[in-house]
Image (cartoon, rainbow, N blue to C red):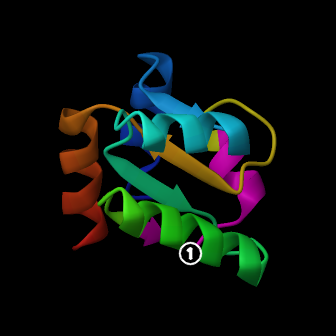
Amino acid sequence: MMKINNILSMAARAGKVVSGDFALRKAMEAKEAVLLLIAADVAVNTAKDYKILADRYKIPYFVLSDTKDALGQCIGKGERAAVAVCDSGFAVAIEKKMKL
């Protein structure tokens, strides 16, 4: 997670991040989300639901090594199970860092 903290924080400040279950689902359905990040400590069924949604809407996703708390802190919020990035530039930068 440390390798994507700065990029994710910048995306959040730019208003290009969506979090919260309802907002995530809405962003994915509207094809606004271009990358989904899932916290490591979410419930198995929750992770499964997000993965199914991401696959349905052809959105790449990563399961992070950090917790919901760390993910939320990164975007300046409380605990977050998952976060959607809604900007292709930020998404590409995060994907590159995740694949290193």
Spot occupied by residue 97 in the image (x, y as percentages of width and height): 26, 61
Residue 65 lies in the magenta stretch: yes
The residue tagged 1 is 65
Residue 94 lies in the magenta stretch: no
Whether residue 24 sits left or right of residue 79 in the image: it is left
Whether residue 20 is visible to the viewer of this picture, yes or no, is no
* Disc 1 secondary structure class: loop
Q: Residue at x 47, y 47 (%)?
A: 5
- Corner quadrant of residue 67: bottom right
- Corner quadrant of residue 20: top right
Q: Residue at x 43, y 62 (%)?
A: 54
From the viewer's side, name the closer residue of 74 and 18: 18
Whether residue 63 sits left or right of residue 32 in the image: it is right
Image: 42 above or below 57: below
Q: Which residues are magenta?
A: 62-73
Q: Which quadrant of the figure contains the C terminus?
A: bottom left
Q: Residue furthest bottom?
A: 44
For mark 1, does the 10 Å Cα neighbourhood hold few (<14), some (14 to 19), or many (20 or more) residues? some
From the viewer's side, name the closer residue of 44 and 53: 53
Q: Residue at x 55, y 33 (%)?
A: 18
Spot occupied by residue 36 in the image (x, y as percentages of width and height): 44, 55
Amino acid type indicated by mark 1: Ser
From the viewer's side, name the closer residue of 15 and 52: 52
Image: 6 above or below 39: above
Image: 24 above or below 48: above
Spot occupied by residue 42 in the image (x, y as percentages of width and height): 74, 71
